[in-house]
Image (cartoon, rainbow, N blue to C red):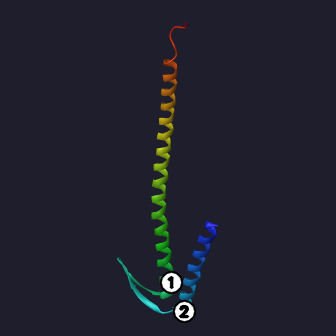
Amino acid sequence: MKYLLIFLVVMAIFVISVTLGAHNDQIVKFNYLLAQGEYRVSTLLASLFAAGFLLGWAICGLFWLRVRVSLAHAQRKLKRLQQQLGQTEQSVTVSQAPAVKE
């Protein structure tokens, strides 16, 4: 269900961008850091939207990866601590046994 909603939002954005692009055939001069060029407004909108979309996914992916690595580290630490606790409980129960039987 979640993926269906995400797909519908992406499709809505795509349809809106195609609609806007179809009505904007003007040529504009675009100055960027190293050079300049003349592009149609629709091409410029589509390419900048795609670049922003990819950049956003890359940044979110890096944060997600950092969280997953942190979670894996925490799970390994928890497993290690649980093993130590189990060993401690075993040594306590063994030491509480009476040394001499009556």
Tell me the residue that label 1 is attached to.
43
Q: Looking at this rendering, what residue extends furthest in the front direction?
A: 102
Q: Label 2 crowding class (10 Å Cα cut-off): few <14, some 14-19, many 20+?
A: few
Could you tell me which secondary element the residue under label 1 belongs to?
A: helix
Q: Which one is in front, 2 or 57? A: 2
- Please give the count of numbered marks on the rendered protein: 2
Residue tagged 2: 23
Give the quadrant of the N terminus: bottom right
Q: Cα distance, mark 2 to mark 1?
A: 12 Å
Q: Earlier in the sequence, mark 2 or mark 1?
A: 2
Q: Is residue 47 above or below residue 60?
A: below
Residue located 48% across and 23% down the image: 92
The quarter of the displayed image where residue 38 is located: bottom left
**Which mark is nearer the camera, 2 or 1?**
2
User: What numbered label is drawn on residue 94?
Assistant: none
Could you tell me the amino acid type at mark 1?
A: Thr
Q: Amino acid at mark 2?
A: His
